[in-house]
């Protein structure tokens, strides 16, 4: 069974939120969609993802632990930039 666009969006947002909670990514104060690299090692995000999954906090969003971790590995590096990409765009 493949995921709907809505499910994919929820998973993507959940993955980013975990990284933000872990301090691996920082959410821009101006842009809710703008996240960029924090000072915490990226592995902390995977640890927190595992923890939240184990506690059942991601029930209904991810059905497999592997699915969650694969998405984290794909999504988090995309946002490992020094500044919020939206702020950078505006200052051009
Ligand atoms: Zn910004």
Image (cartoon, rainbow, N blue to C red):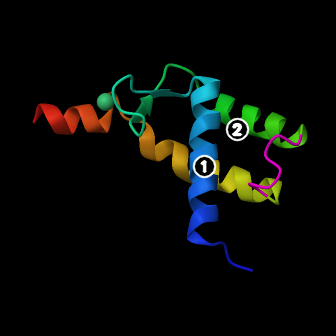
Residue 41 located left or right of residue 57: left
Residue in view at x 24 percent, y 31 percent: 87
Residue at the image point whose x is 38% and y is 36% from the top: 34
**48 is higher (above) or lower (below) than 75:** above
Please give left or right for residue 29 compared with residue 77 in the image.
left
Q: CA distance from mark 1 to mark 2?
A: 8 Å
Label 1 sits on residue: 73
Judge whether 15 appears above or below 18 on screen: below
* Residue at the farthest left position: 92
Position of the C terminus, as image quadrant, is top left
Secondary element type, mark 2: helix
- The answer to whether any part of residue 53 appears in the image is yes
Give the quadrant of residue 14: top right
Q: Check the image and name the residue furthest to the bottom.
A: 1
> What residue does disc 2 label?
46
Counting from the top left corner in percent of width and height, residue 89 is at: 19, 39
Would residue 60 be found to the left or right of residue 18 on screen? right
**Whole-percent x and y of residue 73?**
60, 49
Determine the image quadrant of residue 40: top right
Q: Residue at x 43, y 36 (%)?
A: 80
Whichever of labels 1 and 2 marks the residue nearer the N terminus, that label is: 2
| Residue located 79% across and 46% down the image | 58
The crowding category of the residue bearing disc 1, from other C-alpha atoms within 10 Å (few below 14, some 14 to 19, many at least 20), is: some
Depth order, front residue of 26/38: 26
Q: Is 41 colored magenta in this rendering?
A: no
**Which residue range is magenta in the image?**
56-62
Q: Is residue 60 magenta?
A: yes
Residue 51 horizontal/vertical position (percent): 83, 34
Q: Are marks 1 and 2 in contact (CB under 8 Å)?
A: yes
Label 1 SS: helix
User: Which quadrant does the N terminus fall into?
Assistant: bottom right
């Amino acid at each position: 069974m493949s995921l709907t666009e809505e499910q994919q969006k929820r998973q993507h947002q959940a993955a980013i939120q975990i990284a933000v909670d872990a301090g691996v990514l920082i959410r821009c104060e101006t842009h809710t969609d703008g996240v960029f690299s924090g000072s915490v090692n990226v592995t902390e995000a995977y640890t927190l993802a595992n923890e939240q999954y184990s506690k059942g906090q991601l029930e209904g969003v991810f059905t497999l632990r592997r699915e969650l971790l694969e998405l984290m590995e794909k999504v988090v590096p995309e946002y490992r930039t020094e500044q919020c990409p939206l702020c950078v765009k505006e200052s051009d």
